[in-house]
Image (cartoon, grey):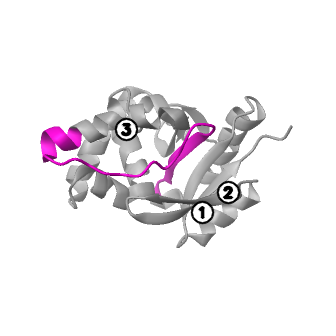
Amino acid sequence: MEYIIRKAQPADASQIAPCLFLAMEEIVFFLFGTQEKEKALHILETFVQSTDNQYSFENCWVVVDESDKIIGACNVYAGDRLTYLRQKILDYNVTYLGRQLEIEDETQAGEYYIDCIGVLPTLQGKGIGNMLLQYLIKNYSIENQQILGLLVDFDNPKAKKLYVRLGFEVVGKKTLAGKTLEHLQYKPKK
């Protein structure tokens, strides 16, 4: 089976949201103030479909099969844009949940941040996440000399092993939603 990686479109939101949710379920529940999966997915889909936020289709790449069905997705954005891109989520919390959301910065200026990568459960372990990461490395680091950054859970050694095998290096730790995670970067070769 042949897969294609392409930039996401607004109409892809209903297929992107479940992929992103797989990669960050706890964070989605935290950000949107609910433990109800369907409600959280609906809110995430709304953000994916809109513009100027960290989960927007504007920041997403998708992997599609030959029928153009999305089987994996990731979002990537410049770290120095996090504050701007997160604002709509903070505004949502104030307007609809009546809370001032406090959340740490998971990225910073100087890196393009891979916020999350998710592959449909039925296709996990088939190299699709690997293919997507290699695509990002090629486009951001090799061709455009950008540093790629991501966070990995200490409880997910399998993912960390993949990242390290692809050339990512541990550069420190970051806290996100109260949880300490490892910060890895892929630095372009000079």
Is 152 rendered above or below residue 7? below
Q: Amino acid at mark 3?
A: Arg
The answer to whether any part of residue 50 appears in the image is yes
Q: Is residue 107 left or right of residue 21?
A: right
| Mark 2 and mark 3: Cα distance apart in space | 24 Å
Mark 1 surroundings: few (<14), some (14-19) or many (≥20) residues within 10 A: few
Q: Secondary structure at mark 3?
A: helix
Residue 43 occupies which quadrant of the picture? top left
For discs 1 and 2, the disc positioned in front in the rendered view: 2
Q: Which mark is residue 125?
A: 1
- Which percent across, then down, holds residue 88? 30, 34
Magenta region, residue range: 92-120
**Residue closest to the eye, 82 or 40:** 82
- Which percent across, then down, holds residue 72? 51, 47
Mark 2 surroundings: few (<14), some (14-19) or many (≥20) residues within 10 A: few
Q: Is residue 82 left or right of residue 164?
A: left
**Residue closest to the eye, 71 or 175:** 175
Q: Amino acid at mark 2?
A: Val
Check disc 3 and report the residue beneath it. Answer: 86
Dot placed on the residue nearer the N-terminal end, 1 or 2:
1
| Mark 1 and mark 2: Cα distance apart in space | 26 Å
On whether residue 111 falls in the magenta region, the answer is yes
Q: Amino acid at mark 1?
A: Gly
Q: Which mark is residue 171?
A: 2
Q: Secondary structure at mark 2?
A: strand
| Mark 3 and mark 1: Cα distance apart in space | 31 Å
Q: Is residue 32 left or right of residue 128?
A: left
Residue at image coords 46%, 54%? 120
Residue at image coords 77%, 35%? 142
Instruction: Determine contact: label 3, label 1, CB under 8 Å.
Output: no
Residue at image coords 18%, 41%? 94
